[in-house]
Amino acid sequence: MYKETSPATPAFFVLFPGVDPTPDVERVGAKFGKTANDKSFINISMGQGQEMIAQNALKECALKGYWLMI
C-alpha cells in the first residue's frame, strides 16, 4: 500500500474490531526514518477534545514532511 501513497495521496484505513494497523504503519514509518521517538511520526487517537490537537498536528506534519496517523 505504501507505494500507492504520496504527500498528495494519503492512506485511509477502515478499522474492524480486533484489528489495529498501527504496528504495521509504525514499522513502515521506521523504515523511512519516521518514528515517534523523533516526533516525525505522530499518532493521535481521536476522541473528545482531540480535534484542535489533530488540526495542529496536521499543519505541522504537512510543513515538515512528518507522518500523521489519526
Image (cartoon, helix red, strand yellow):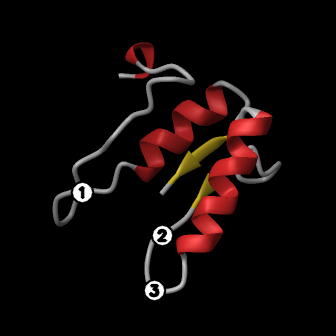
Q: CA distance from mark 2 to mark 3?
A: 10 Å
Q: CA distance from mark 2 to mark 1?
A: 15 Å
- Mark nearer the viewer, 2 or 1: 2
* Percent position of residue 23, x then y: 46, 49
Horizontal placement of 36 versus 67: left or right?
right
Q: Secondary structure at mark 1?
A: loop
- Mark nearer the viewer, 2 or 3: 3
Does residue 35 appear anywhere in the picture? no
* Percent position of residue 42, x then y: 64, 54
Q: At label 2, which amino acid type do we have? A: Ser
Query: What label does residue 33 carry, if any?
Result: none
Q: Which residue is mark 2?
A: 45
Query: What label does residue 19 carry, if any?
Result: 1
Q: Secondary structure at mark 3?
A: loop
- Seen in the picture, residue 33 relative to 58 is either above or below; the reply is above
Q: Earlier in the sequence, mark 2 or mark 1?
A: 1
Q: Earlier in the sequence, mark 1 or mark 3?
A: 1
- Mark nearer the viewer, 1 or 3: 3
Residue under the image location 17 percent in, 66 percent down:
17
| Residue found farthest to the bottom | 48
Residue under the image location 48 percent in, 70 percent down:
45
Q: Secondary structure at mark 2?
A: loop
Q: CA distance from mark 1 to mark 3?
A: 22 Å
Q: Which residue is mark 3?
A: 48
Residue under the image location 36 percent in, 48 percent down:
21
Answer few, some or many: residues within 10 Å of disc 2's Cα (few below 14, many 20 plus, some between 14 and 19): few
- Seen in the picture, residue 51 relative to 7 is either above or below; the reply is below
Please name whichever residue, 56 or 45, is drawn nearer the observer in this view of the structure: 56
Labels 1 & 3 near each other (Cβ < 8 A): no
